Each structure stands twice: as structure tokens, then as C-alpha cells.
Image (cartoon, rainbow, N blue to C red):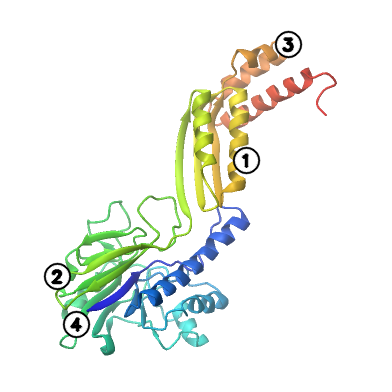
């Protein structure tokens, strides 16, 4: 029997520019922590090897310190690692991989082949047919070479590649780096370990994407896993188990509010989030001033309790109710301005500014109605 972990798309060194600096740093650090968890799982489960199907690094330009930290994070598992370059860290003549070799930080138990070929591991009867990418984009199926690669008799034949299985991924993505959907059968593979798609996905019983072990985008395609693979004998069907490794939960909510109860329900949902959540919130609809202020307070509370929050309330229009309008009628001129601002919210080019001005006007009117004014 052969027993290994299949993982991919670590994207070490990824930047999160859309987030606040502190949040971005924590999200980047979580990627190192995910690698350490994978190494610990490999040691705990006493696997024969760990296979990493590309995009170990997010860019070629990561720092030397980042390269050293990555290999340090793998230290808990002393067995064999086989890792290949993907489209983000392609094995160019001058690449992050060539720098890693120059730095001397790739441990002896880690093999990162620079070109297509067989990584033979006779101690565990495993032959890894590896297809590292040597350029960011290619329109040729680099795994075609697997069909003609010979391996020693009795070896498990496991392919390791990075790219897009033609016609089988659920979204319309780049057609570069194509992989034939029947490559495992053509190349007589016991298993084909793939990277590039960031979600955990079975193409067939022998062909799997592991997905990224730590979610990194707002896409519900089941990221945050590694695959535990066991094959009883060459030719036998693999038994694949998904192991959760992700720390943060990324969610994208799109909400339309029309009643105060809608805002209350949204506030209650946000209150259930915790420090492991990353939320992108898009809110649209029409609310009165009291509801808008209550929602803003709920958003502020949520921002303090989750890992990161990206709120967009620009689609939320302020629609004064009778209580709001009664306050504005105290001044005829103020009422006229409020009516103009409310009308301007219908103009996409001026909606955000008009809505904010209307909120400020209502708030000022309320404060000025308090004896002595706002303090």
C-alpha cells in the first residue's frame, strides 16, 4: 500500500491589498501556519510522502526570508516531499526555485524537479511523474509526456501536475496550461494529483484537485483541505479522504434591505461571526435614518470581532420616514435640501455623496433640536 498527502496552491507570499494592514499580515501568516499543519498531519498519520502540486509560492519576487520560512514550516515531517512549480512560481532559469537552491535551504528530503520526469522513490515503491511548469502560460498539455514515461515494475504511478482540466472545471477560467480529462487513464496512473483550482474537486476517482489549504478569496468552491490518499496496490482504486486545514472562513454576503426587520436580521447574523471569519458585505435597499444608524453600529461591532470585514453600503439608500421628515419640516429650506438630496440618490454618479449628505443633514437636525445643541 502507498499512503500520501496531496496538497497544492500554498501561495506563500500572497499579498492582501484590499484589507487593512494588520488584517493582511494575519492572512498572509495563516498560509505559513497551514503548511505547518500539513507537516504535522503528515507526521501524525505516518504517511509515506507529501506531494505538492504547484504554486508553492505566489510570486517569483518573494523575499529570501520568506523562502527560508516556507521550508522551515515543513520541518515537522521528515519523510519525502515532492513539490513542483506552478504558473505563479514557474521554474524559469531565474526563479524563486533557483534562488531557493542558491540559498541552500531546500532540505535533503524535499525534491523539486526542474523539468518533466520521474521522481523515483524506491524505498516506498512510488514513482512520481512530475510536470513542473517552466513558464507561466502554455497552451500545450505538459502531462502528455506522462503517457510515454516508464517506471520500474511494481511501482505506484502517481502524476503531479498544475493546470486546468479541459472542460471539467465549474467556472470559465483561463484556457492556459490545459490537462486532458482522461490523462490518468492514458498514462496508466494510479492517481493524478493536481493543483491550480483552489477548491477541493474530484475529476474522476483517480484525478483530484486538492485546492488551497487556506482559503484566500471569496469563492465558495470548498477550499481549506488537503487530501489523504491510500492505494492498496498498483491498479487499485484510491481511497481519498479530505482533511480540513483552513483557519479562516471567507464569506461574501449580498443583502437587500427594505424593512427595519431585515436590518435586524442581518445584524443578528453578523453577531454570530467570530475571529475566524473574513466577510465581504454588500448591502442595498432603502432604510430610514434610525435603521441606517443601527446597521452602521452593527457593522462597526462586527469589524471589531471578525478577522477582516470589507463592507460596501454604497447601494443602501436613505429614505426618510415620517419621523425623519417631521424633524426636517422645522425649517422649510432644510426640508427642500433634504428632498433634493433624496432625489439625487437615484443618480448612480451622485448616490453615495447624496446619501452621506442626507444622513449628515438628518443627524445635524436631530442634534440641533437638543436643548443647548450637541456637545
| Residue position marked by numbered label 1 in the rendering | 300
In the rendered image, the vertical position of residue 367 relative to residue 122, given as above or below: above
| Residue position marked by numbered label 4 in the rendering | 149
Q: CA distance from mark 3 to mark 1?
A: 31 Å
Q: CA distance from mark 1 to mark 2?
A: 54 Å
Label ID, residue 330: 3
Tell me the quarter of the image containing the C terminus: top right
Q: Residues within 10 Å of mark 3 (few under 14, many from 20)?
A: few
- The image quarter in which residue 85 lies: bottom left
Q: How many marks?
A: 4
SS at circle 1:
helix
Query: Which of the two labelled residues, at mark 1 and mark 2, occupies the earlier sequence position?
Result: 2
User: What residue is at 40 percent from the left and 72 percent from the top?
Assistant: 41
Tell me the quarter of the image containing the N terminus: bottom left
x, y (%) of residue 35? Answer: 45, 70
User: What residue is at 62 percent from the left and 23 percent from the top?
Assistant: 289
Query: Which of the two labelled residues, at mark 2 and mark 4, occupies the earlier sequence position?
Result: 4
In the rendered image, the vertical position of residue 298 relative to residue 258, given as above or below: below
User: What residue is at 46 percent from the left and 52 percent from the top?
Assistant: 249
Amino acid at each position: 500500500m502507498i499512503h500520501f498527502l496531496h496538497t497544492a496552491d500554498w501561495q506563500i507570499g500572497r499579498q492582501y491589498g484590499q484589507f487593512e494592514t494588520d488584517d493582511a499580515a494575519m492572512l498572509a501568516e495563516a498560509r505559513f501556519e497551514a503548511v505547518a499543519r500539513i507537516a504535522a498531519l503528515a507526521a501524525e498519520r505516518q504517511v509515506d510522502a507529501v506531494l505538492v502540486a504547484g504554486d508553492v509560492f505566489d510570486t517569483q519576487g518573494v523575499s529570501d526570508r520568506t523562502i527560508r520560512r516556507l521550508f522551515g514550516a515543513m520541518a515537522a515531517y521528515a519523510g519525502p516531499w515532492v513539490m513542483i512549480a506552478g504558473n505563479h512560481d514557474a521554474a524559469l532559469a531565474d526563479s524563486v526555485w533557483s534562488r531557493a537552491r542558491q540559498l541552500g535551504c531546500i532540505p535533503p528530503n524535499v525534491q523539486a524537479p526542474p523539468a518533466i520526469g520521474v521522481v523515483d522513490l524506491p524505498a516506498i515503491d512510488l514513482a512520481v511523474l512530475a510536470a513542473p511548469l517552466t513558464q507561466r502560460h502554455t497552451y500545450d498539455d505538459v502531462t502528455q509526456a506522462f503517457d510515454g514515461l516508464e517506471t520500474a515494475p511494481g511501482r505506484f504511478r502517481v502524476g503531479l501536475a498544475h493546470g486546468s482540466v479541459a472542460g471539467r472545471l465549474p467556472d470559465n477560467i483561463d484556457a492556459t496550461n490545459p490537462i486532458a480529462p482522461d490523462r490518468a487513464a492514458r498514462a496508466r496512473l494510479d492517481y493524478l494529483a493536481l493543483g491550480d483550482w483552489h477548491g477541493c474537486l474530484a475529476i474522476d476517482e483517480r484525478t483530484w484537485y486538492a485546492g488551497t489549504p487556506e482559503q484566500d478569496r471569496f469563492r465558495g468552491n470548498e477550499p481549506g483541505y488537503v487530501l489523504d490518499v491510500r492505494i492498496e496496490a498498483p491498479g487499485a482504486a484510491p481511497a481519498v479522504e479530505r482533511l480540513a486545514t483552513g483557519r479562516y472562513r471567507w464569506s461574501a454576503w449580498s443583502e437587500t434591505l427594505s424593512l427595519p426587520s431585515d436590518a435586524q436580521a442581518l445584524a443578528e447574523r453578523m453577531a454570530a461571526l467570530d475571529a475566524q471569519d473574513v466577510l465581504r458585505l454588500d448591502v442595498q435597499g432603502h432604510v430610514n435614518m434610525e435603521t441606517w444608524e443601527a446597521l452602521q453600529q452593527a457593522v462597526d461591532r462586527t469589524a471589531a470581532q471578525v478577522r477582516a470585514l470589507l463592507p460596501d453600503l454604497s447601494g443602501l439608500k436613505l429614505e426618510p420616514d415620517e419621523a425623519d421628515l417631521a424633524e426636517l419640516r422645522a425649517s422649510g429650506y432644510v426640508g427642500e435640501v433634504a428632498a433634493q438630496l433624496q432625489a439625487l440618490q437615484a443618480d448612480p454618479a451622485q448616490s453615495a455623496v447624496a446619501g452621506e449628505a442626507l444622513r449628515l443633514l438628518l443627524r445635524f437636525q436631530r442634534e440641533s433640536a437638543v436643548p443647548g445643541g450637541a456637545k
